[in-house]
Amino acid sequence: MEIQKGPSGVARQLSKDEVGQQARVLLNQFIQDRMASEETEEQAVHMEDLQDPGTPTGPPLEYVREIGRALRCIGDELDRNEQIQNLCDQVNPSANHETFFNVANSFFADGVYNWGRVGCLFYFAYKMAVKALSKINLIRSIVNWVVNFITDYVASWIIERGGWDAIIEYFGTPQNQFYGIVGVGLGVCAGLYLWKTLK
């Protein structure tokens, strides 16, 4: 369990809301880093563009750079994954909240949670943000939907793993295991999403 020291110096477990707030920081950084790596002037998005002023960010993350690096590695692998590219191409960023929920839910529909699938969720949000560059309020909504999904459905799993820092250990797994986890998850989510939308 992830334990944080409170203002009195007493250790305590993070809440689901705090994990969600930390997810916002990590997701905003993920979106900003990926857009910056594409280095086009029209894709410049700043952290303050991605959230309303005064939005809570949760307790500070001790290894934020390492966590960001791990998420970037997942994103780099997903850049080459045809299934997620096809899924992202089919979803309009101005789709309603229910569509985003269905896609996010499809990543975890088989009940399996892992860092690769959390990374898929971040990557999906990034791809939608790229499509919505001229609509900052829409990008904020996408970020909020993903953060709410993580808070409601994934935060307990993240807490059980020991918090966001545990993603760093995930990269000690063999590369084939990573591909298998992400590949199966993407296959399941793409199939479920298409089945739900084409019914």
Image: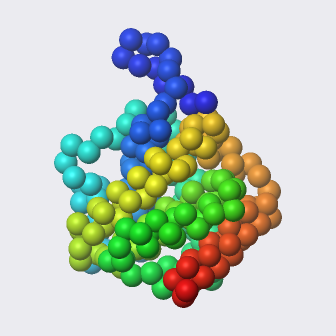
Q: What's the residue at 46%, 47% (across, down)?
A: 151
In the picture provided, is 44 more to the left or to the right than 188?
left
Q: Total of numbered circles in the picture?
A: 0
- Quick check: 123 above or below 16? below
Classify the position of the C terminus by image quarter: bottom right
The picture places residue 81, in percent across and down from the top left corner, at 63, 78
Q: Residue at x 21, y 43 (%)?
A: 54
In front of the other: 59 or 104: 104
Residue sitting at x 37%, y 68%: 97
Quadrant where the image shows the N terminus: top right
Location of residue 145 with respect to 188 vertically, above or below: above
Asked whether the viewer can see residue 26, the reply is no
Residue 44, x across and y down, in percent: 29, 69
Nearer to the camera, 44 or 9:
9
Q: Which residue appears farthest toward the bottom when viewing the image?
A: 198
Residue sitting at 56 percent across and 30 percent down? 2
Q: In the visual, does 90 lie left or right of 109?
A: left
Viewer can see residue 87: yes
User: Is 103 left or right of 97, judged from the image as shown?
Assistant: right
